[in-house]
Image (cartoon, helix red, strand yellow):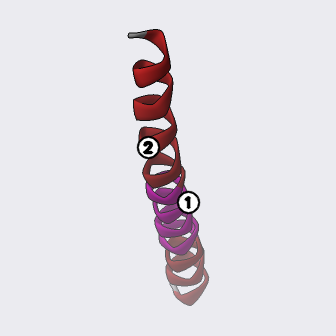
């Protein structure tokens, strides 16, 4: 049982890390996209 719990914890931790990275990337990409939009108009 403990092994399953450890695996589940590792999976959820990895998923949280991925979500955090995606949020950071979005925070960086949105301003860039806004700049590109300004250049095109």
**Mark 2 or 1, nearer chain start:** 1
The answer to which of 21 and 5 lies nearer the viewer is 21
Question: At numbered mark 2, what does the secondary structure look like: helix, strand or loop?
Answer: helix
Q: Main secondary structure of the magenta part?
A: helix
Residue 21, horizontal then vertical, whole percent: 55, 60
Residue 4, horizontal then vertical, whole percent: 54, 76
**Range drawn in magenta:** 11-24
Seen as rendered, the residue at the extreme bottom is: 2
Q: Quadrant of residue 2 in the image?
A: bottom right
Residue 29: in magenta span: no
Badge nearest the viewer, 2 or 1: 2
Question: At numbered mark 1, what does the secondary structure look like: helix, strand or loop?
Answer: helix
The answer to which of 4 and 39 lies nearer the viewer is 39
Give the vertical position of 38 relative to 27 (above or below): above
Residue 18: in magenta span: yes
On residue 32, the disc is none
Label 2 Cα neighbours within 10 Å, binned few <14 / some 14-19 / many ≥20: few
**Quadrant where the image shows the C terminus:** top left
Q: Residue at 50%, 24% (x, y): give it.
A: 36
On residue 31, the disc is 2
Q: Residue at 54%, 50% (x, y): give it.
A: 25
Mark 2 to mark 1 CA distance (whole Å): 16 Å
The answer to which of 9 and 5 lies nearer the viewer is 9
Disc 1 target residue: 21
Residue 37, horizontal then vertical, whole percent: 41, 20
Q: Residue at 42%, 40% (x, y): give it.
A: 30
On the picture, is 8 further left or further right than 38?
right
């Amino acid at each position: 049982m403990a092994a399953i719990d450890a695996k589940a914890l590792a999976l959820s931790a990895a998923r949280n890390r991925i979500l955090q990275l995606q949020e950071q990337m979005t925070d960086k990409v949105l301003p860039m996209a806004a700049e590109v939009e300004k250049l095109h108009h």
